[in-house]
Each structure stands twice: as C-alpha cells, then as structure tokens.
Image (spheres, helix red, strand yellow):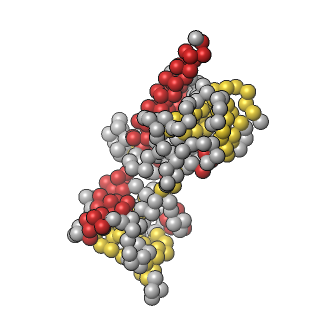
Amino acid sequence: MTNEEIYNSIIIGSGPAGLTAAIYAARAELKPLIIAGNKPGGQLMDTTEVENFPGFPQGIMGPDLMQNMTRQAERFGGKIVQENVAAADFSQSPFSVKTDRAEYLAKSIIIATGAEAMWLNLPGEQRLRGKGVSACATCDGFFFKGKKVAVIGGGDSAMEEANFLTKFAERVTIVHRRNEFRASKIMLKRAQENPKINFAANVSVVDVVGENNVEGLKIKNNDSGEESVLDVQGVFLAIGHKPATEVFKNAGIETDEKGYIKIINHTHTNKEGVFVAGDVADARYRQAISAAGAGCMAALDAEKYLAEAESGSSN
C-alpha cells in the first residue's frame, strides 16, 4: 500500500541520531515521518544507567532517555510509525521507502539506522546484556571501578577497550580464540606492557556465568578441551560492529569496505537529498551524544536542502 502523502522528510531510525533529527526537523515544521522499527530506541534500550549524556547529573536509564526523546519529537509534530524498512529507492525524488506494511514517499531522507555490536549469542551473554555484559567500554567502564573484567576480541578495538578499562578495573583479561592477534603491533604492545592486563589466548568462550549479574566467564582451551571459569564481574565484547545498511544495498548509497555509509560533505551522502547521521556512518566514536549531534546537523542540512529546492522550483 502506497501512502499518497509526500513527506518533507523521512527519518529512518529511532536512536539518539534519528530522534534528535526528528526534534529539529519537527521544530522547523517539516512534519517528518520517523520510521522507528519494531524495536524503537536503538542500542540505549539495552543500556541500564547512562551517566555521560549531558543534562542528567544523576544519570538516566537508557530506555527513559529514549522515551523522553520520543515524546519531544512527537510534541513538535513528528509522526512515528513502528515499522521495519524493507527496501528503499533513492534514484529520483520523491524518494521511496518501503516497510513491512506500506510505502512512503519523501522529498528528503535522513538515514539513522545505527550499528549493532556483534555478539557471540550465548545464553548468559544475552541474558546479562546491560547487567555486566557490554559492548562499549567508554559507555560502561565507569561502573566497574575496582572490579575484574574480561574483554573478548583480538583486534585493535579489543586492545583499546582493555587499556581504557584499566582506568577503572582492578584487572582486565583479554580473551581471544587464537594464539595470534589481529591487532596492530603498537596496540598489542601497549596492552602487553600494561601491568593491569592479562591474556587468555587460544580459548573459546563457552558462556557468561551468573543469573542477575556477571559472576564469571566460562572458557575452554582449544587444544586440551579443558574448561575453566575466569573470575570476572564484567564482560566486554570487542569483536566488531555491523552497520545497519543492508536495506540500502540496492538504493545507490555508497558505503565503505565495512559497510558504513560514506559521508560526502558534513551529513550528505552521495545521493542529493539523502543525509546520514549516527553510528551507521560512524565507526569511531559510537556515542549517544555524538550521534545526537549528527542528527541535529542532518536535520539542519535537510531543512536547508528543502528550502533551496523550494526556492529553485519557485523561480
């Protein structure tokens, strides 16, 4: 079913980037449509307390923060639908976005679909996400002061996360399934020289131990098959992130070798009238506040684009 209305802007995604873009676009009276997905709110919905988002000196629960942003976007006239995008066509304006329920048309698009941390999909890992299991050391490291934690991974990200966590944790153990590490020599050396970092190499992760919080990490030696439990109270996954760009594969949007959308200029993509914000284009910072800032910029760029297009059409 094709919706006959042509929106000024469609915002795809409902994390900090998408909802901030929605707030700015709605306040500019663009009356945006926000396609939030069936599980709106982004990665912060899996986060307990957020202490590094400005304006909340006592912290705020991740779902509460996203609910506040949603209400703010709706207050200014943003329309939110909980549907999943299935395909998009950005070859001509108005642009087309197809969901699992309908087809929508818009004069501009803001892509803010985010990126999902890669997980091992172990029962304990999934059960304890946000309760000692995390994929963001800079987000959650503060909560592990004086505790023992494990970082799973063997690349530069794992080394960087481990080094960062030593600011808070008593001990950090890097757990890797191979004897060799993918990390660059300088990053590996930095971790090896840190007295707070230990290594558990050539082991597979069996599961995260604990019911309501992390009590240990069960691992298995790949040679002997012997199982043991690391004494840790926190587990950080550092095995990579996957940007949510699959649905735009045939829409003509340029991505880099890892699948992140290429930013051509500020928030512009290679398609005129299509903008991007947040983790779907950011493999480096991956913070709620940087995503929100990018959402603001994308909305302002979309507003300017629409004004210029309108001015040009009226001449």
Q: x, y percentage for residue 248?
A: 61, 45
Residue nearest the observer in this picture, 132 or 174? 174
Q: Taking 230 as reference, is 283 above or below it?
A: above
Residue 293 image offset from top left, x and y in percent:
41, 36
Q: Is residue 49 above or below residue 30?
A: below
Q: Of all residues shown, which one is farthest toward the top?
A: 315
Q: Is residue 214 left or right of residue 115?
A: left
Quick one: which residue is furthest to the right in this view? 1
**Image point (73%, 27%), residue name:** 4
Confirm whether residue 127 shows in the render. no
Furthest-bottom residue in view? 224
* Left or right placement of residue 240 versus residue 157 in this view: right
Q: Residue at x 43, y 50 (%)?
A: 283
Is 166 located above or below residue 68 in the figure? Answer: below
- Viewer-closest of 101 and 253: 253
The picture places residue 245, in percent across and down from the top left corner, at: 57, 48
- The quadrant holding residue 219 is bottom left
Q: Is residue 244 above or below residue 127?
A: above
At horizontal 51% and vertical 28% (from top left) the residue drawn is: 302
- Residue 33 image offset from top left, x and y in percent: 61, 31
In front: 108, or 151? 108
One can see residue 274 in this view? yes
Residue shown at 40%/46% (left/top)? 287
Which quarter shows the C terminus?
Answer: top right
Q: Quadrant of the N terminus?
A: top right
Count the labels in the image: 0
